[in-house]
Amino acid sequence: MTLDALPMDVPVRVTSLSGLSAFDKDRLSGLGLRPGVAVIKILKTPLQDPVECLVGSQLLAIEARLLSHIRVEAS
Amino acid sequence: MKRIAALAGRPNTGKTTLFNALTGLRQRAANFAGCTVEKATGVMRSSGGEIEIVDLPGTFSMVPQTEDELVSFRFLSECADSPDDLIVLCVAEASNLDNDLVLPAGLKAAGYPVALAVNMVDEAALNGLKFDAAELSRRLGMPVALVSARTGEGMDKLDGLLSPSSPLRADLSQALDFRRASKKRLHELQETAIETARAAAAASVTLPRRSILPVTARSIAIDRVLLHPVAGPLILAATMFALFQALFTGAAPVMDFLSGALGALSSALRARLPEGALASLLCDGAIPGISAVAVFVPQIAILFTMIGFLEQSGYLPRAGAMVDRGLRPFGLDGRVFIPFLSSFACAIPGVMAARTIPSEKRRIVTILLAPLMTCSARIPVYTLLITAFVPEAFRPLGFNGRGVVMAGMYAFGIALALLLALATKFTSLHELHPSPATVLPPYRVPSARELARYVWARCWHFLSRAGQVIFTLSLILWALAAFPRDAALLAPIEAELASARAASPADPALEKTLEDRLGAARIEGSVLGRAGRLIEPVFAPLGWDWRVSIASLSALAAREVFVGTLGTIYALGGESDPSEGLIKALQNAKNADGSRRYNVATAVSLLLFFAIALQCMSTIVTVRRETGSWKIPALQFTFLFGLAYVLAFAGYRLTLAFLV
């Protein structure tokens, strides 16, 4: 499953980041979004994009276009 | 040889608060060589001697991606080449060690001497976290101090870690040169550092049983309100409305007081000093020069108090996230929101507010476009022209036509800025890789001390840097407007004025008229006045005569000067009744052949010109200070002047063709 299809408030774990540009992948990794980390989708901002997610112990606003590239599994 | 402690870490780890706590007020700001990223340096007095502390830009990982991150790594490699004794003090947020330990672990693996400050331990205690500092130090192979820069807890331990007498001095000859390191090597370092960080955090931090930390859970609960689809935009609009109101209304009394006090000082001096160059230098040059600097300080102080509050509370990145989607098609993002909004009051705080944008290219685009927002200095000019040339009977859809035109000028500024932002997507200024995600830090109660320090630093920076140049340029402009004095032109008016003053009973209206005529004659004969006549042919295609050209030239000091200068020039050149004021004077002004001197087309061309041209010396100087070179303000001035000229010409011709 990818993060875009996941309902809100369901705890999952990132398994892989696929189909992203090297820049986006490195940036997300630098921000702490990498395989193995726990993620919960929290809410969509008023314009539906970006989406607020709890990644590990920090909150990130992630561009909606990236969510379909983040594969997750139930934690 | 001196000891340098470079503060490194991810943004939002409290790095700057720690820097302030270590250095107190012994700070200075400087630009990193070859770029516009600013570094703050300061001196820490430790038990072993003085240490230079450098606050590096925030760095997310061992693979630098933005200009800010490149600057940090480049600085470390340059230090490694120098004979100075370097220590990297990495700052980590105690509640986010999994991520924040990656940088210290990576730098250590790259051969740099690293010490670690685990910051915000007070907040971590609220989260129920417990730390084993000795285990963390052993796992990472570096000294560790648990601190809270906000409360001062544990700061004495940093003295021991950083003191020149401490045994951290390392051989840097084997340290990785980041300027030459391959991406592959950096990725390897990053991967190793992630594993080291994860293992060190797992072994040294005891987590509470709850899956979400209490401080984070509280932030999520607040976000459900502040980022709510309906309430979120309303709260944002209310916050921005309050900011805008505070800027306009809060600053106005202080600005009026300063202007009034300096005006009174000027009048008092004029009354005591004999009329001549010295009185003019002080009253028309130096005091207005000081005034031109001082009146901006209240706005800067209020704006940065509010921005500092929003930033420290954690709301600013959320406000940015809310408008981000709407700005992305124009090649901008949510972080340009505050600088643009601030520029409606004044472009100077707006340009300075662009510092919160971490990407260098985006910051420059924001600085380039911020002056297009309708600042308060344009209001007197717009009011004069709209009142004089938009007929009262003009009522589109029943609305007040003058109000509609005024609103249209605001909309024009925004639309042009967005269009130009779109155009920069095709230039080297386009940010190819905007960050795909941003950190939303936990909500925190701002510290009054930190806020005061933040506001003071911004005000002092403006006064000490931009202020000096604005003051000097004001004096130069005064000299251009005051000299040479054309005795042949001035003598008859001066004689008339002398006899009017001596007459009994006194005629104050006549005296005022003659004083204004004298002022107008002085400007006309000065270098500025002659330049106005010289450039008249340049602006003639826009429908301007020499009077408007001079007023526009003098408005290079500040836009609102246009009204004053035009008033002085029109002050009874014998052409119209002074008691009717400048608006009537402009409406009734006639050419030698009896035709109207100005019409709606002239007003359109002036409005367009003033909406676009960068006629603000103070903004130009501030842009110079904020970007570290004259190149950007020169480009900005030239481009906006050219665009203003072309659009004013087009507006003039089209209005003549269709409306007049």
Image (spheres, coloured by chain):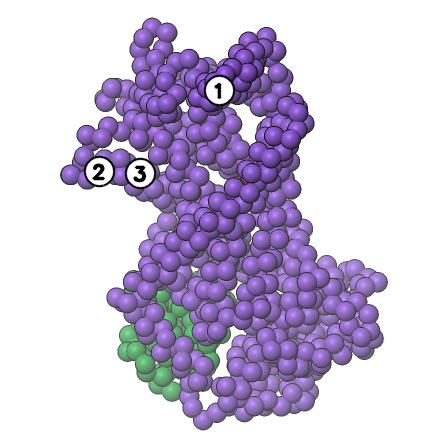
Tell me the residue that label 1 is attached to: B506
Q: Colour of chain A?
A: green
User: Where B461 sits versus B213, above or below?
Assistant: above
Q: Position of residue B271 (x, y in %)?
A: 61, 30
Q: Position of residue B427 (x, y in %)?
A: 46, 42
- Left or right, B370 with respect to B175, comes to left
- Label 2 sits on a secondary structure element that is loop
Residue nearest the viewer, comparing A51 with B652: B652
- The residue furthest top is B593
Tell me the residue that label 3 is attached to: B406
- Say if labels 2 and 3 share a chain: yes
In the rendered structure, are the residues bearing label 3 and label 1 in contact, judged by CB atoms less than 8 Å apart?
A: no
Quadrant location of the N terminus of chain B?
A: bottom right
User: Where B344 sits versus B529, above or below?
Assistant: below
Q: Colour of chain B?
A: purple
- Label 3 sits on a secondary structure element that is helix
| Residue under the image location 59 percent in, 38 percent down | B265
Q: Give the class, few, some or many, for how many residues have Cα within 10 Å of label 1's Cα (few <14, many ≥20).
A: few
Q: Chain of mark 3?
A: B
| Residue under the image location 33 percent in, 69 percent down | B227
Q: Earlier in the sequence, mark 2 or mark 3?
A: 2
Q: Earlier in the sequence, mark 3 or mark 1?
A: 3
